[in-house]
Amino acid sequence: MPRVPSAAAAHIGERIAEARKRYTLTHDALAARTGIDSSNIRSYESGRAMLSIHTLIRIADALDTSPGYFLEGLTPDQFDTTDRRRKAG
């Protein structure tokens, strides 16, 4: 799985938190809408964890927005697309 620097994870998390608050939803309410554990949502919002594109889509749907909203403002160089778990050679 591609690695994402913490700056990108933090940016996406901030956007999720902004959208959630705009709808006046608690973490538990968003968890109920998405089927994602509220502790995971907190981790995504704080930038401590990076979510999959599938999870991002679920959150975007629950917040009536597009996944692109959360990625807006990020540049391609902010993403490390190498898989460091693979062995070289």
Image (cartoon, helix red, strand yellow):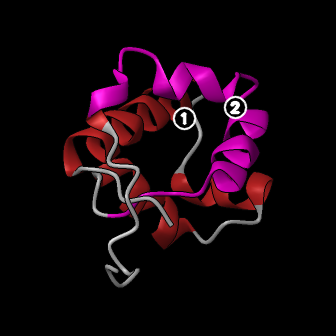
Instruction: Check whether the beta carbons of the residues at disc 2 and disc 1 lie within 8 A of each other.
Output: yes
**Does 21 appear above or below 51?**
above
Compared across the picture, whether 75 is left or right of 15 comes to: left
Label 2 vs label 1: CA separation? 7 Å
Compared across the picture, whether 7 is left or right of 54 comes to: left
**Does 29 appear above or below 39?**
above
In reply to whether residue 54 is colored magenta, the answer given is: yes
In the picture, the quarter occupied by the C terminus is bottom left
Give the residue furthest to the front: 89
Name the secondary structure under disc 2. Answer: loop
Instruction: Write the residue at 40% across / 37% down.
Output: 12
Residue at numbered disc 1: 20
Residue 87's disc number:
none
- Kind of residue sitting beneath label 1: Arg
- Magenta region: which residues? 49-77
In reply to whether residue 62 is colored magenta, the answer given is: yes
Compared across the picture, whether 81 is left or right of 27 comes to: left
Residue at numbered disc 2: 63
**Does 29 appear above or below 7?**
below
Q: Residues within 10 Å of mark 2 (few under 14, many from 20)?
A: many
Q: Residues within 10 Å of mark 1 (few under 14, many from 20)?
A: many
**Residue closest to the eye, 15 or 79:** 79
Q: Position of residue 77 (x, y in %)?
A: 28, 30
Instruction: Write the residue at 46% across / 17% down.
Output: 72
- Kind of residue sitting beneath label 2: Leu
Q: In terms of sequence position, does the residue under pointer 2 or pointer 1 come before the other?
A: 1
Q: Position of residue 57 (x, y in %)?
A: 72, 42
**Residue closest to the eye, 32 or 53:** 53
